[in-house]
Image: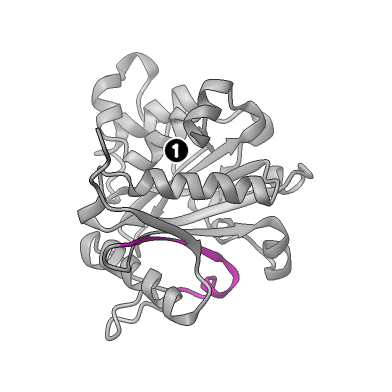
Amino acid sequence: MPDTGPSFTIKIAETEAELRAAQRLRYEVFVRELGGGGELVDHDAELERDRFDPHFDHMLAIDNTTSEVVGVYRLLRGDKAAALGQFYSEDEYDLGILKASGRNLLELGRSCLHADYRGGTAMFHLWNGLASYVAEHEIEILFGVASFHGTDVQALAQPLSMLHHNHLAPPDLRVRAQDAVFQSMNLLPAEALDRRAAMLAVPALIKAYLRLGGFVGEGAYIDHAFNTTDVCLILDTARMNERQRRLYTK
């Protein structure tokens, strides 16, 4: 059957207008839809932005029929983070074990889709674009924070505990939430888990990383500014089996 859905262009933002389009979509999703905020958010212009934006590559999914940016991914390579002085997620997680590994790192963040494109092929195209970027820059470890909506950890006890018991990163990849903000994810014993209910409560992006063989770091971070509970996801390309690799690059 022919694909009658929209076609997409995946590219890295090259102009100020393209960056603003990414920030506008982020505002729509993270601020208007999810109730987030931040000191550099521009409510008048409806742009969600921060001090890290100029240092990241911004991957865009553009609907070719409308020329609108409908998906974004924010990417920071290890060499750029070294020049900047930190990765974005170091405010939440101790990344020392990854930085000391000597491997090529890529931080992912601010991933979102316009509501009208969720459940379609836009995210698949963004993942393919990310796979090409990873190959081009010889990335070995991908990581970044991903969020549950809301800050009530007891309401998230099932999915957080399931991630802790079943998907905790091995010691050589196990980043840890900073001590000052550490929130344990070990909220329920393994025998008390309802795996089906827990997985239903896990956001689609986190599920996608888990399907690829991804792990989570130890501890969560409660982000009151963004009205989220964050976990750190880590994906080691060397640990991906062939089935996972095909899923990632097909």
Q: Residue at x 54, y 56 (%)?
A: 89
Would residue 101 be found to the left or right of residue 125 on screen?
A: right
Q: Is residue 93 visible?
A: yes
Q: Quadrant of residue 56?
A: bottom right
Q: Position of residue 2 (x, y in %)?
A: 26, 38
Of residues 118 and 184, which is closer to you in this image?
Answer: 118
Kindly identify which residue carries mark 1. Answer: 184
Q: Amino acid at mark 1?
A: Ser
Depth check: give the residue in front, 22 or 201: 22
Range shown magenta: 50-64
Residue at the image point whose x is 30% and y is 20% from the top: 195
Q: Give the image location of residue 201, x and y in percent.
A: 26, 35
Question: Is residue 206 positioned above or below 243 on the image?
Answer: below
Q: Within the magenta stretch, is there residue 220?
A: no
Is the residue 184 above or below the residue 79 in the image? above
Instruction: Report x, y in % for residue 39.
Output: 40, 77
